């Protein structure tokens, strides 16, 4: 069975590009720009890895990460945070919320792909 990845990023173009490339890599990919919808998806299906943007209006990626870590079945599920924010405070907050990785935008797709393979192997 294909591994399922959920992307939550308020930049629709980022979600679309990542979804296309990850689908081409053999994953089943769900993508949304709406954090509430993303949480609903996570609650209604099994997700193998999350990709969360940090700067999402409303419930940001760090809040979503902390919420997911509070769900027992996602306590150990890999969460990759992507962000254009390079400050140490944001990076630290992502780590404290339970993120496995913090990847700065823009990034080469190969970097993200390698991280996904690492966590899903």
Image (tube, helix red, strand yellow):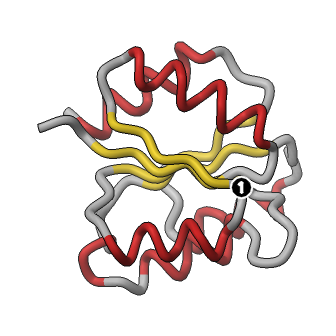
Q: Position of residue 4 (x, y in %)?
A: 31, 45
Element assignment for label 1 = loop
Circle 1 residue = 33
What's the residue at 59%, 70% (across, down)? 37
Question: In terms of depth relative to the viewer, which is nearer, 112 or 88?
Answer: 112
14 and 106: which one is in front?
A: 14
**Residue positioned 53% across, 60% down in the render:** 99
Q: Is residue 26 left or right of residue 30?
A: left
Q: Nearer the viewer, residue 14 or 51?
A: 14
Q: Is residue 109 above or below residue 7?
A: above
**Quadrant in the picture for the C terminus:** top left
Residue farthest to the left, as pictured: 1
Q: With respect to residue 46, does 74 lie above or below? A: below
Q: Quadrant of residue 22?
A: top left
Look at 71% across and 55% down and name the residue there: 33
Q: How many marks?
A: 1
Q: Residue at x 30, y 66 (%)?
A: 45
Residue 2 lies, with reference to residue 21, above or below; the image says below
Q: Is residue 49 left or right of residue 98?
A: left
Percent of width and height locating residue 75: 32, 74
Q: Quadrant of residue 108?
A: top right
- How crowded pointer 1 is (Cα within 10 Å; few <14, some 14-19, many 20+) is rated as many
Residue 107 appears at what percent x and percent y?
71, 22
Q: Position of residue 35 (x, y in %)?
A: 66, 69
The N terminus: image quadrant:
top left
Which of these two is toward me, 94 or 52?
A: 52
The image quadrant that residue 88 belongs to is bottom right
């Amino acid at each position: 069975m294909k591994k399922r990845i959920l992307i939550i990023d308020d930049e629709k173009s980022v979600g679309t590009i990542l979804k296309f490339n990850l689908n081409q890599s053999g994953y089943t990919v769900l993508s949304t720009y709406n954090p509430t919808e993303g949480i609903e998806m996570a609650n209604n299906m099994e997700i193998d890895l999350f990709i969360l943007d940090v700067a999402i209006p409303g419930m940001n990626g760090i809040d979503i990460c902390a919420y997911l870590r509070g769900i027992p079945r996602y306590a150990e599920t890999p969460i990759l945070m992507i962000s254009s924010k390079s400050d140490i405070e944001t990076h630290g907050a992502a780590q404290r919320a339970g993120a496995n990785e913090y990847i700065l935008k823009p990034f080469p797709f190969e970097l993200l792909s390698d991280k996904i393979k690492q966590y899903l192997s």
